[in-house]
């Protein structure tokens, strides 16, 4: 049995890989964007692949966070689903199918099966899945690079002494070699003097896998991979920026029976090009370039239930890639809200809301979209959740890099919904940006936060063991109380929060307290036992937490 050091795929290896792959794509993102001339020169391939891997990473981290019993199967399932749900653009959707095929093969490995064989077979299946997902496969693209990598992996795995690390080292080297030859296969690349952008992204990911398993890092990028340009059309009219082919990119998630997909593929293939349909087991990610947006969406409706529909007009996107973005002005707060009532509170304070919460935290792409779409020159992000802080920071740095100095983004690391409410309450657009961020940050830090929830499984907490159905009191993110009754635990939390003093208590009722009776009783308790403290009660509608509380 191989050890992690020798190349076995363990939970630890998966966690390291998602971090290193995301960081590697972040470093290469601008370079890959600049290589993007096929199928549409919209300068977003690196960004799309980066955000797709970030979505997979975030899903893995959420699935394994705080779970001592988290296993490899849980992480792999989360990885595949996160990539599918978070895939962006043509390259991101294809990449999600590749990653999904790989994790499914790893999860299906038999006890005693050689790791080298498993990984070589996983890369083979990734190649087959990516070719099958594309309506009309084209050589000289990320498909070609992936196939070359899988063929090298298979050859290496034939050696009975080979390990997973040897397989990925061979695959990464073959990918770099195949990438260098992509201009010979695709005229658009040859004319622009670049290698394929998606192929470069695949190469970066395979390099990351090699680094995780061997500790070696690839040599710095030199020609022919780096220092490329996108030829800027001349002539002056906006029509010069319109790509040959369909004018719109349409993407959506689709809930549909597997049997409906062949009909969908035929319908969409007749409407445009760059068709990619990936997924399975009732959930699909659909991507196509068309002129008739309505017909593409109607085809999805005929097949099942399309949702998270995204439509991009290429001419506008290419202008943005050339730096011709509309002038930004003003300041905006982007806040993650865990329930409809909380969303209404943040919106009433003037914030742009991104819906999230336990079990469905927002992806990097969703936060990036909110930051860029608000049109402000200065943006303050309130993630309002410990596990969403890193996601928000990635979205913020990506937005600033894409805007080339036209936008400033600050992430206030609010750990809970109630600390976000405290921060947005002191937001003042009339102050300087730095002063506003400072005041909001200080207020959030000084707000002591707690909550009550009900244990869903047996676990060991800071307050001792708990059983399903036990009431848990949360203070500053830790389970500090284990009890039997919601009101008793909630008032205990309030007493502890008020032990250090305070002037204002905020109580937010959750979906499990629809009439607000528990929140009202707790407010009355504060008024009786802490008469010098003001109390406000809101209907938050958040799941899993009957009450959220803060003391300022």
Image: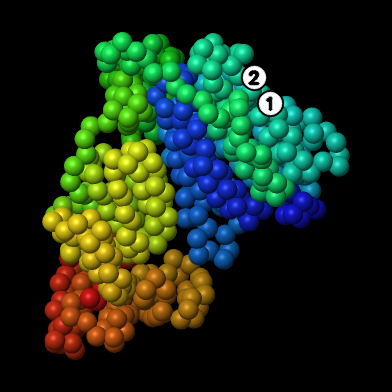
Between 537 and 363, the one nearer to me in the picture? 363
The outermost residue toward the right is: 160
Q: CA distance from mark 1 to mark 2?
A: 7 Å
The local crowd at label 1, few if under 14, some if 14 to 19, many if 20 or more residues have their Cα within 10 Å, is some
Position in image of residue 216 (x %, y %): 70, 46
Position in image of residue 408 (x %, y %): 29, 48
Q: Residue at x 49, y 81 (%)?
A: 464
Q: Which mark is residue 177?
A: 1
| Residue indicated by mark 2 | 181
Between 225 and 413, the one nearer to me in the picture? 225
Position in image of residue 80 (x %, y %): 53, 42
Quarter-of-image position of residue 138: top right
Above/below status of 303 relative to 233: below
* Label pair 1/2, CB-CB below 8 angstroms: yes
Quarter-of-image position of residue 118: top right
| Element class at badge 1 | helix
| Element class at badge 2 | loop
């Amino acid at each position: 049995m191989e050890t992690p050091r020798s190349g076995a795929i363990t939970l630890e290896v998966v966690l390291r890989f998602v971090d290193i792959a995301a960081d590697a794509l972040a470093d290469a993102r601008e370079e890959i964007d600049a290589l993007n001339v096929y199928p549409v020169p919209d300068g977003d391939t690196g960004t799309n692949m980066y955000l797709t891997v970030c979505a997979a990473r975030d899903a893995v981290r959420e699935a394994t966070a705080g779970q001592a019993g988290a296993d490899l199967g849980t992480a792999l399932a989360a990885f595949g689903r996160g990539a599918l749900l978070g895939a962006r653009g043509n390259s991101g959707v294809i990449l999600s199918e590749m990653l999904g095929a790989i994790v499914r093969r790893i999860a299906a490995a038999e006890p005693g099966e050689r790791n080298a064989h498993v990984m070589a077979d996983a890369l083979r299946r990734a190649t087959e899945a990516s070719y099958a997902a594309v309506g009309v496969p084209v050589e000289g693209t990320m498909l070609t690079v992936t196939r070359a990598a899988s063929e090298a992996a298979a050859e290496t795995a034939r050696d009975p002494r080979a390990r997973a690390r040897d397989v990925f080292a061979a695959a990464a080297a073959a990918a770099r070699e195949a990438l260098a030859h992509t201009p010979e296969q695709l005229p658009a690349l040859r004319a622009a003097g670049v290698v394929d952008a998606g192929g470069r992204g695949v190469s970066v990911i395979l390099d990351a896998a090699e680094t995780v398993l061997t500790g070696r890092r690839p040599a710095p990028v030199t020609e022919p991979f780096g220092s490329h340009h996108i030829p800027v059309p001349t002539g002056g009219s906006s029509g010069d920026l319109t790509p040959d082919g369909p004018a719109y990119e349409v993407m959506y998630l689709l809930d549909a029976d597997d049997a409906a997909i062949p009909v969908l593929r035929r319908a969409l293939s007749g409407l445009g090009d760059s068709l990619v349909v990936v997924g399975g087991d009732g959930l699909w990610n659909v991507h196509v370039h068309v002129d008739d947006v309505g017909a593409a969406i109607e085809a999805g409706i005929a097949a099942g239930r399309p949702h998270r529909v995204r439509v991009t007009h290429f001419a506008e996107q290419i202008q943005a890639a050339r730096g011709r973005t509309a002038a930004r002005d003003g300041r905006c707060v982007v806040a993650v809200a865990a329930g409809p009532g909380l969303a209404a509170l943040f919106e009433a304070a003037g914030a742009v809301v991104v819906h999230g919460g336990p079990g469905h935290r927002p992806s990097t792409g969703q936060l990036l979209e909110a930051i860029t779409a608000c049109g402000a020159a200065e943006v303050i992000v309130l993630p309002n959740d410990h596990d969403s802080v890193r996601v928000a920071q990635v979205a913020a740095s990506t937005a600033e890099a894409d805007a080339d100095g036209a936008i400033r983004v600050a992430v206030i690391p609010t750990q809970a919904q109630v600390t976000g409410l405290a921060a947005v309450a002191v937001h003042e657009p009339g102050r300087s940006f730095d002063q506003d961020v400072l005041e909001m940050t200080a207020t959030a830090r000084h707000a002591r936060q707690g909550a009550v929830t009900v244990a869903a499984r047996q676990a060991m907490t800071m307050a001792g063991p708990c059983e399903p159905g036990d009431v848990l009191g949360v203070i500053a993110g830790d389970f500090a109380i284990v009890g039997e009754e919601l009101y008793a635990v909630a008032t205990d939390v309030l007493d502890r929060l008020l032990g250090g003093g305070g002037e204002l208590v905020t109580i937010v009722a959750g979906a499990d307290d629809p009439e607000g009776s528990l929140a009202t009783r707790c407010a009355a308790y504060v008024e009786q036992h802490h008469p010098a403290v003001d109390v406000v009660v809101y209907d938050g509608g958040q799941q899993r937490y009957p009450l959220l509380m803060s003391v300022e």
